[in-house]
Amino acid sequence: MRIPFNKPYITGKELSYIYDAIQRGHLSGNGEYTKKCQSWLIENIGSKKALLTNSCTAALEMTAVLADIQPHDEIIMPSYTFVSTANAFVLRGGVPVFVDIRPDTLNIDETKIEAAITERTKAIVPVHYAGVACEMDAIMAIAEKYNLLVIEDAAHSIMSRYKGRLLGSIGHLAALSFHETKNIISGEGGALLINDLRFAERAEIIWEKGTDRSKFFRGEVDKYTWLDIGSSYLPSEIIAAFLWAQMEQAESLVASRLNIWNTYHKAFQKFEMDKLIRRPIIPIDCTHNGHMYFLLLPDLQCRNAFIAFLKENGIHAVFHYIPLDRSPGGTKFGRKHGEMKITYEISDRLVRLPFYLELDEMSINYIINIITRALTCPTIVNTSPQRA
């Protein structure tokens, strides 16, 4: 049996909507399907404005422009994240300031943010890892105290909640991903969510290559012209049509993912009780979306042996991330604040299991059986107590 790490899920309506987009004769973006998707995001996430983008990376780049990041401005974020979180601000001359993460959720440690603030700090970028919310009340309070922007990197987090509020609707700005590994997909794709309306008009101009083209198409101006910096951030109608098929079934897709997540979680409980691994932790005030399932092995050697054993048995599991502050780009463009003990330990210990909607019962049981064999093999996972 061969089980990949990810397999994109198709609802069945994507091709018919793409065909409809072609028949409408408008493929360049900001057409009927773009508007449908943006309206869905406003209604279902609760943001005040939404703009589809080519990627979550593009949405983050737009937030850096909207935040008016200038050379040497500082942006506080976790080191344990994907490179786009930092790169978007580095492109504007900004300096990522990396802080450590919490050992439970693997999110930015909100208790370490305030000490990292300097006179150059412009924004805080919390990353909701695995669709589990950061401690947003504390983060928003710090931002208000120091007059900082909060930009949610919600790439993993569509339809996840923090104290009943949907992620992406809490910070001043937020970025979503519809990459093929995410819960709702369009191959590549993303969205900028705007919760502070002072950014709304400029965001639309940046999105449309620095022009007021959107106003022109709405009949608000008699011609459009170049007003500001910008780029071609909006996706084509073909991508939006594909995405709309996914959005229509968003609730059922998340429910199905949660079923897989819960099956994994229950199966590995006994191994956590024996201190051989640690499972994900979901705080009581967070509702997650079943984005991914990971295990924490005791150390790097065990993690590598575990992944190799799964590979030998046809199962593709992966690890991530290499901490950004330890990367060549991170040392060149950013700096760390304080110790990164948790970040480094998690980076060495975490393994992500195959997770996609077409994982059937037979495949899931096979994965669980192989992992059971791995976790009971003394040459892979020793029986010494696991670190916190």
Image (cartoon, helix red, strand yellow):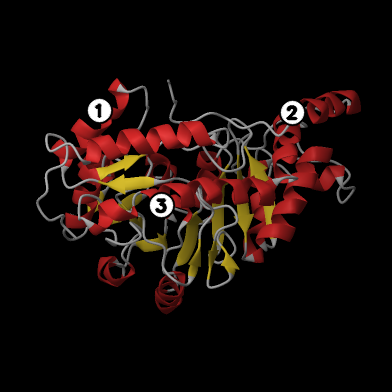
For label 1, count other residues whose C-alpha is less than 10 Å away and answer few (under 14), some (14-19) or many (20+): some
Q: Which is nearer the N-term, disc 3 or disc 1?
A: 3
Q: Can residue 327 be seen in this view?
A: no
From the top left corner, tell me how far across and down residue 326 is, in percent. 20, 42
Name the residue type under label 2.
Ile
Q: Distance between the residues labelled 2 and 3?
A: 37 Å
- Percent from the top left, x then y, of residue 122? 41, 62
Secondary structure at badge 3 equals: helix
The answer to whether residue 66 is above or below residue 35 is: below
Nearest the viewer among 374 and 350 is: 374
Where is the C terminus found, in terms of image quarters? bottom left
Instruction: Determine the residue positioned at 21% across, 55% down.
Output: 274
Label 3 – label 1 distance at C-alpha: 20 Å
Report whether residue 304 is seen.
yes
Give left or right: position of 68 versus 267: right
Q: Which mark is residue 238?
A: 2
Taking the image as shown, residue 144 lies to the left or right of residue 49, namely left
Q: Is residue 334 left or right of residue 213?
A: left
Extreme-left residue of the structure: 384
Residues at discs 1 and 2 in contact (Cβ within 8 Å): no
Distance from Cα at disc 1 to Cα at disc 2: 41 Å
Residue designated by label 3: 265
